[in-house]
Amino acid sequence: MKKIIFFIILVIFLILVCVGSIFIGTGYNMYTRALNNESIESKFQSIKNKPDYTKLEEMSNTYKDAVIAVEDHRFYKHNGVDIISVMRAIVTNMVKGKVIEGGSSITQQLAKNTYFTQDKTITRKVAEAFLAWKYEKELDKDTILELYVNTSYFGSGYYDIGSASKGYFNKSPSELNDYEATLLAGLPNAPSIYNPTINFELASQRQAQVLNKMVKYKYIDENKKAEILSLKKEYEEYFSKKDGND
């Protein structure tokens, strides 16, 4: 009986290894094809040539802190793929019986934004990981963060923090106040859903998640969070006068 159980476990293990090898192989091929179609140097140069490209030093500290807190709080510690976040996401999704968390790092999201589609496939996730590791070898963390917020979609046709800041608030990123900065930091998670000109209440709920993360990781305290949220009514009136075109 023990031999049968051992044999079954061995077969299952070998199947998993084979399936995993297939996904790794196809993901690696997707990664190499993407780079063959356009080099990293060419890709990044086209991004930096955008009229609304914003350098990291031109963004408010609150905005940068908010992005890191809500998207990837171990951003400056991992090598492109945060294994802890990935494992936590797997456990959470298994418990919930559906996809609740993605576990993608900021570097992985940059890989997706620059070379891949939004389709949630295992092959794409593998390709994304290979590219994330390459980015981490060739770029410093601040450059990766800068490129990420300049390739993220914020809704209403705004594909970078510069155009989103101007479009939603008629300000440059450096001029954003804490309320505006934390609101924008939450939009790329689901821009069609959280677009404040279309559904301000959902955008506010997402902003509250951002602020909770900022408190959790000690970027701000509860008093600062309350101060920021006290402006909600003012901005609800502001967005009620704007038209949303996602």
Image: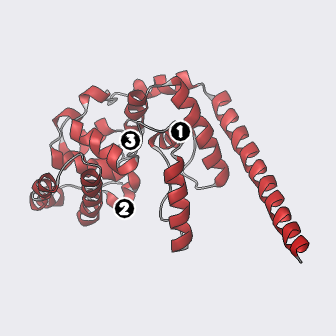
Mark 1–mark 3 distance (CA, rounded to whole Å): 15 Å
* Residue at image location 41% in from the left, 36% down from the top: 76
Secondary structure of the residue carrying tag 1 is helix
Secondary structure of the residue carrying tag 3 is loop
Quadrant for the N terminus, please.
bottom right
Q: How is the image coloured?
A: secondary structure
Of mark 1 and mark 3, the one earlier in the sequence is 1
Please say whether residue 155 is visible from this viewpoint. no
Q: Quadrant of residue 161?
A: top left
Q: Nearer the viewer, mark 2 or mark 1?
A: 1
Kind of residue at badge 1: Ala
The percent position of residue 104, horizontal first and vertical second, equals: 50, 49
- Which residue lies under the disc numbered 2? 193
Q: Is residue 35 above or below residue 190?
A: above
The percent position of residue 16, horizontal first and vertical second, equals: 77, 58
Kind of residue at badge 3: Tyr
Q: Quadrant of residue 222?
A: bottom left
Question: Do the numbered discs 3 and 2 sit on residues whose CB atoms are within 8 Å?
Answer: no
Kind of residue at badge 2: Ile
In the foreground, 101 or 240: 101
Label at residue 111: 1
Please say whether residue 43 is visible from this viewpoint. yes
Mark 2–mark 1 distance (CA, rounded to whole Å): 23 Å
* Residue at image location 9% in from the left, 59% down from the top: 230
Quadrant for the C terminus, please.
bottom left
Q: Is residue 143 above or below residue 238?
A: above
Of mark 3 and mark 2, the one earlier in the sequence is 3
* Residue at image location 55% in from the left, 37% down from the top: 132
Residue at far front of view: 2
- Which residue lies under the disc numbered 3? 159
Of mark 2 and mark 1, the one earlier in the sequence is 1
